[in-house]
Image: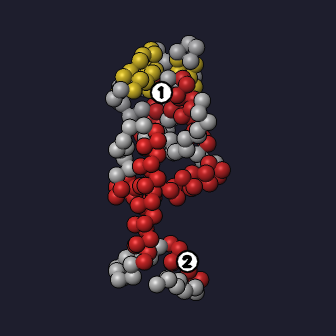
């Protein structure tokens, strides 16, 4: 719609099965959206399909029947419950598919190179938010907000120039660029 691509990591699946990397996490289940069912890796289909609301988000929960889960030889890999059946909660279809696609994409080298560019700007954004009040716009309107952003960027640059010129603080940690230059045998000469 706006031609903007948001690039950020999708949180990993934090379920016990995904963390152990030996159980059946959500990706092991096949979701049949038309029939509103989940199919486990052993072929059993879910007995119920309900909508959950957790912290303002909507999830779809597929619960399996005890008669399918209790005698299953892979029960220990699937659920930690002694008696209860397995349930799987997923986002609505459109969001679930985006999440799965993004989790796969972020494993690729191309995605990691693109994200490294974004990660390089995070320190600047953090400094502007913490030290220069960029979290909130002081004015209304696009033109005035733009002026605030330009002035904030100038303040950040002036602050960094002042820090760079300040040679009195010897406890300041060397930047990565300074460490690289020192390692390569170059001397950084600062103008007076």
Question: Image check: 28 left or right of 153?
Answer: right
Determine the residue positioned at 51% across, 78% down.
179
Front label number (1 vs 2): 2
Could you say which quadrant of the image residue 79 lies in? top left
Question: Image check: 175 left or right of 140?
Answer: right
Determine the residue positioned at 36% across, 31% down.
81
Residue closer to the observer: 31 or 157:
157
The label number, if any, that marks residue 186 in the structure image: none
The answer for how far apart the CA atoms under marks 1 and 2 are is: 47 Å
Determine the residue positioned at 57% across, 29% down.
97
Q: How is the image coloured?
A: secondary structure
The label number, if any, that marks residue 180 in the structure image: 2
Residue closer to the observer: 7 or 96:
7
Q: Position of residue 62 (x, y in %)?
A: 46, 21
Residue closer to the observer: 10 or 77:
10
* Residue that numbered label 1 is attached to: 90
Could you say which quadrant of the image residue 93 lies in? top right
Q: Is residue 65 visible?
A: no
Q: Determine the secondary structure under disc 1.
A: strand
Question: Image check: 110 left or right of 6?
Answer: right
The local crowd at label 1, few if under 14, some if 14 to 19, many if 20 or more residues have their Cα within 10 Å, is: some
Question: Image check: 123 left or right of 83?
Answer: right
Q: Position of residue 48 (x, y in %)?
A: 44, 14
Residue found farthest to the right: 110
The tag earlier along the polypeptide, 1 or 2, is 1
As displayed, is residue 21 above or below residue 158? above
Q: Determine the secondary structure under disc 2.
A: helix
Q: Could you tell me which quadrant the N terminus lies in?
A: top right
Q: Position of residue 176 (x, y in %)?
A: 50, 72
The local crowd at label 2, few if under 14, some if 14 to 19, many if 20 or more residues have their Cα within 10 Å, is: few
């Amino acid at each position: 719609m706006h031609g903007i691509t948001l690039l950020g990591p999708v949180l990993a699946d934090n379920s016990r099965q995904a963390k152990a990397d030996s159980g059946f996490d959500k990706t092991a289940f096949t979701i049949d959206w038309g029939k509103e069912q989940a199919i486990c890796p052993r072929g059993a289909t879910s007995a119920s399909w309900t909508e959950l609301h957790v912290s303002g988000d909507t999830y779809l929960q597929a619960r399996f029947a005890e008669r399918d889960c209790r005698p299953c030889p892979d029960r220990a890999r699937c659920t930690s419950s002694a008696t209860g059946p397995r349930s799987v909660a997923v986002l609505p279809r459109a969001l679930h598919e985006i999440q799965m696609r993004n989790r796969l994409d972020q494993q690729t080298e191309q995605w990691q190179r693109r994200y490294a560019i974004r990660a390089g700007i995070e320190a600047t954004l953090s400094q502007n938010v913490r030290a220069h009040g960029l979290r909130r716009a002081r004015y209304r309107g696009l033109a005035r907000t733009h002026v605030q952003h330009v002035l904030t960027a100038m303040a950040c640059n002036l602050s960094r120039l002042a820090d760079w010129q300040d040679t009195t603080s010897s406890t300041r940690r060397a930047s990565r660029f300074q460490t690289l230059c020192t390692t390569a045998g170059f001397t950084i000469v600062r103008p007076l």
